[in-house]
Image (cartoon, rainbow, N blue to C red):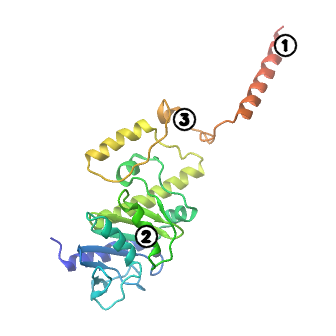
Amino acid sequence: MNSEINLKNHICEIGKKLYDKGFVAANDGNISIRLHDHEFLITPTGVSKGSMTPEMIIKIDENGTVLEGNYKPSSEMKMHFAVYENRHDVQACVHVHPPFSTAFAIAGIPLDQAIMPESVVFLGTIPVAEYGTPSTNEIPNAVKRYVQNHQGVLLENHGALTWGKDLDHAYYLMESLEFTAKINWIAKQLNGDRELSQKHVETLVRMKTQMGIKGESPKGVITPEGIHAQKFSPSANRSLSEEDLDLIAEKVTKNLLGELRKLF
Ligand SMILES: [Zn+2]
């Protein structure tokens, strides 16, 4: 069993990783761990998460009352409580503002495409929780809607939140979330954010179930031959309208007639 000092040290280590990765700027972000239903460890407000020391980590109860520590707990603790109250298997939460994930949150685009096996199996779909003013009940209320069926959310025009069975799990989900958002963004620049077929996704979801991983997965694309039916070209994602097809048919016919005239 982890002692409280070990857990506080671990929060500091994860805070440094998040800061070093550029997932937060200045004093942004917050991390929490559930000790039991009435006691939680949480990061302080107004302190860089990259340079925390264990004595800065605060112990609070389920109402946010400080039980131990000299710092002020994060004002976003209500968002963490919303997760703990609704998921008894969750022991840790990570909230940061990673650039690619936050850009998707600003654009209001959920990460729900089946673009890579890893994201289908380990991350699942990441919805956008409706915007709320930080520190009010608006964000917790929005997050609650998605807690049961997901492992994290994008917070509209704000950032991202993940939750897990322990702090490492919540942290790695955040890494995966940002990585998926980054890859998705790059693929979109190539006009090539092609999705796995529904058949391939079904196989991955069976693996996911065997591994005991919870959460909703993307559905995949319904194509008879799967992803290989989609040609790798910048126009792979574009479908042709009836007008386009008529125009092509017209051009082909004209060319063919031209060739035939040369022959006869
Ligand atoms: Zn925030």
Residue carrying label 3: 230
Find out whether the residues at labels 3 and 2 contact each other: C-beta distance under 8 Å.
no
Residue linked to disc 1: 261
Of callouts 3 and 2, which one flags the residue occurring earlier in the amino acid sequence?
A: 2
How much space separates mark 3 and mark 2, taking CA atoms?
A: 41 Å
- Amino acid type indicated by mark 1: Arg
Quadrant (top left/top right/bottom left/bottom right) for the C terminus = top right
Q: CA distance from mark 2 to mark 1?
A: 72 Å
What amino acid type should be assigned to the residue bearing mark 3?
Gln
> At 35% from the left edge and 38% from the top edge, which residue is drawn?
203
Residue at the spot 44% in from the left edge and 57% down from the top edge = 126
Give, as a three-letter code, the residue at label 2.
Answer: Asn
- Crowding at dot 2, Cα within 10 Å, few <14 / some 14-19 / many 20+, comes out as some
On residue 141, the disc is 2
Q: Position of residue 100 (x, y in %)?
A: 51, 63
Q: Nearer the viewer, residue 63 or 187?
A: 63
Q: Quadrant of residue 150?
A: bottom left
Judge: label 1 CB < 8 Å from ligand 1. Answer: no
For disc 2, does the CB lie below 8 Å from ligand 1? no
Q: Left or right of 109: which side holds 51?
A: left
> Residue 164: percent from the left, percent from the top?
31, 63
At x 43%, y 63%, the residue is 153
